Every structure is written in structure tokens, then in C-alpha cells.
Amino acid sequence: MAKNMHSDLDIIYFTLFPWENAYSSVSLSFTREFVKHNRVFYINHPYTVKDFVKGWKQPMVKARKTDMLLNRMRYETIPELPDVVAVQPPLTLPINWLGPGKLYDRLFEVNNQIILKTIKQVIKDYNLKNFIYLNCFNPYYAGALPKEFGAKLSMYQCIDDMTEEAYTAKHGARVEEEAIRNSDVAFVTSRNLHKLKKHLNPNLSILHNAVDISIFEKALERPLPRPKELEGAKGKIIGFTGNINEYRLDYPLFKMIAEQHPDKTLVLVGPLNSDCYKEYGLDKMPNVILTGGKHIRELPAFLQHFDVTIIPFLKNKLTASIYPLKINEYLAAGKPVVATNFSEDIRSFADVVYIAENEKAFVQAINRAIAENSAELIEQRVLTAKQNTWTERVKQFWEIVDKHLVGVENVI
């Protein structure tokens, strides 16, 4: 590998996850590392006209209102990453409700051109000559950059199985296949995704999710204030952090955990994006606390006060392709982890995680995990997390990218 081959490369990073998102995201985590050595242009997912109207009163929509109404892109600064150039594209059309066919394809291309025009403007305004393009899980727009744009490489990141959720399966799965095929290099986050997508691109590599150690090691460094949501918690605390959604979580298992551990408190920390928890009465159970969404930097205080952490994912085609962000976050905080046996990737953590084959085993493993916790096990968990940091992932990223830059003319 040529020394510092990529040190003067700019990165255009177009992503599904807006920079103002308070929760963990692959693209923001990579950006924090990229910007240490490279200039990054972080292009947000656009609002559709429908998003704009529905979110009219939201602070970030208000801040962008004038530019959106005038149909123009907008440069922004990310407070925690002032060296990153953030870009908000103009409004696009809401088209996912349409069925497959000529009308969808025509409007898809209209939207695509809006994003391509935005990228072209960024290239012009900053006189970009030596850059790579990376699309993070947003194949609905500019899945791969046309060659004439001049990127040294056009790359795509697949972080989930689009075929297994109704909304993304409708159009996203198909256009993602096109994005992967048309990219010079593509990445997936799990072993199963690699099996599913390897036929689409010979230059497909696994780049697992990771952890920002600097955030989560705070749970071990010093006592942190007990979050107010835990004031009523009784006994040992069983904790989960993550999106409370419809497709991944085993809600009957949540209920069984609360019922079988009445002397403990089950705490679910994360945005409530599904009412499934209500269907199973979790919101009515006396030893269950739902905190709602929290900023990633608030999580260490919760984790410090958890006695055991859980990953109660369903075992299905969707979760078979998941390498969860939270696994290394839990381990970085030194916490015991009990997980269902949902994927090949979770099984790779068998030395440091309690993996349960069924609901009964899961419930029983919680007591075992709490009882067996020790300084030695905490150290082992942290060492595992340190092998899975975003810094390490970015090193892996450049090792892969540099191999493909070797044959590109005028890289430096």
C-alpha cells in the first residue's frame, strides 16, 4: 500500500442519516474519523415535499425553510464537527407510494437529478479535483456517481437487508442492487449481507459496525449522575438501548423478562417508533420503564447503572443480516450482554456474550450474567470493544480503498 495515498483525498459522503440525528449512525461515526485526515462533504438525505409540510414546525425545517421554498441547496456547519462541510439538498418528490412502472422511474430520475445537481455544485464551489464518493444506504438518490463527475472511486455502503422491510422492499431493494452493481467498491456490515450481495459486485467487502470508545468508556471512568428516569427503578436493572421498532425486537420476550424478573426493573432506552410495546402491555407493567430517545452521549450514564444489557432480537431473515451497533457499545461500557441467537455475527461474540437459544434460556441467562460479573470479565469485554472501534474500521476502509486506487490515474 502506498504511503499516505489517501491523505489529500476529499470525501463526498451522501447518506440516509442526517447530521442532526441524535442517535448512533454509521455515517456520522465514519465522518468523525474521516475528518481527522480528510476534508468531508456530508450531504444530508433530502426532505421530500411531504416531509417538509409535515415537519413545518420542527426547528431544523424552520432553519432551512427559505432555501427549501426557493428550491436551492444550503451549506451548513455541524456543531460537533466544524471542519465538516454539511450540505442540505433542495426538496424532492415523495414517490415511494407509487407502484413500479414508468411513472415511478420518471420521477425517480427527477429526484436523482436534484441530488446529482447538488453534488455537482459542491464539486464546483470547492473546486474538487481529487475526491471519492461514498453513498451510505441511500440508493434512492445518486446510488453511484456517474463517471463524468470525476470521482476517483464511487462506493456504496449497505447496512441492512432492504428486502425484509415493507417500505424499503417496495423500491429500495431493487435500486440498491443497481447502486451496488454500478459502484467501483461496495461495503456491507455483516457476513450474511455479504452472502446475499456478493453476486452483485466482485469488489464487495465486509465492514462491520463499531463503537466510539471515547463516548462509552465514560461508563467505567468515573461515577455518572443517575438519570432521572431511573429514580423509580427497583432492584437490579436490565437495560436495552436502541430503536423501539416493529421488525427486529421480540416483544413477547420483553414481556416475559419483566414477568419472570419481578424483583428487577427492565429499562428500554430509545425512540418509540412502533406501538408494539403497547400491544404487549409493556407500558402498563410496574417494573418496565420506557425513556424515549436519548442522545448518544447520554447513554453511558444509563449503561453505568445497568446490571445487565440485552439484545432481544427476533430470529428472522432481517435480523440474520444484522451486526448491531449496540453490541460494542455495551461491551465498551463493560456490561454483561445477553442476546438471542439471531445472526452469524452475534455468534462471533460467543466468548464475551451470553447467547440464548430460546426465551426460557434468555430469561435464565440474565441471572447468570449478573451473578458471574467480575473485573476480569469487564476487562475482557472492553478489550473486545477496543478491537471494534470506528478508528479500526476506518483503517480497514482505507486498506480496501487503497487497493482500488492503485490503478486509478492521477490519484495524487
Image (cartoon, rainbow, N blue to C red):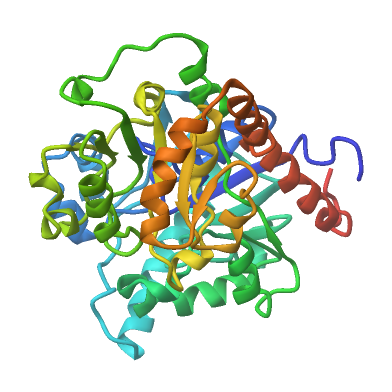
Residue 174 horizontal/vertical position (percent): 47, 80
Image quarter hosting the N terminus: top right
Quarter of the picture containing the C terminus is top right
Residue at (31, 60) in percent of width and height: 250
Using the image as rendered, state which of residue 54 and residue 272 is in the foreground.
Answer: 272
Q: Which residue lies furthest to the right in this view?
A: 2
Q: Is residue 298 visible?
A: yes
Tell which of 231 and 41 is nearer to you: 231
Marker count (numbered): 0
In the drawing, does residue 25 fall left or right of residue 409?
Answer: left
Q: Position of residue 26 (x, y in %)?
A: 51, 46
Q: Position of residue 217 (x, y in %)?
A: 53, 21
Look at the picture and state if 136 lies above or below 289.
below
Residue depicted at 29% across the width and 16% down the height: 226
Give me the residue at 16% from left, 39% from top: 58
In the figure, is residue 56 to the left or right of 78? left
Query: Between 77 and 222, which is closer to the camera in this rendering?
Result: 222
Q: Quadrant of residue 263?
A: top left
Q: Where is residue 214 in the image (x, y as percent from the top left)?
A: 55, 22
375 vs 137: above or below = above
Residue 44 appears anywhere in the view: no
Left or right: 142, with 406 as reference point: left
Q: Is residue 61 above or below residue 94?
A: above
Q: Which of 387 and 352 is in front in this view?
A: 352
Q: Residue furthest bottom?
A: 101
Q: Which residue lies furthest to the top in this view?
A: 222
The residue furthest left is: 284
Q: In which quarter of the image is residue 233?
A: top left
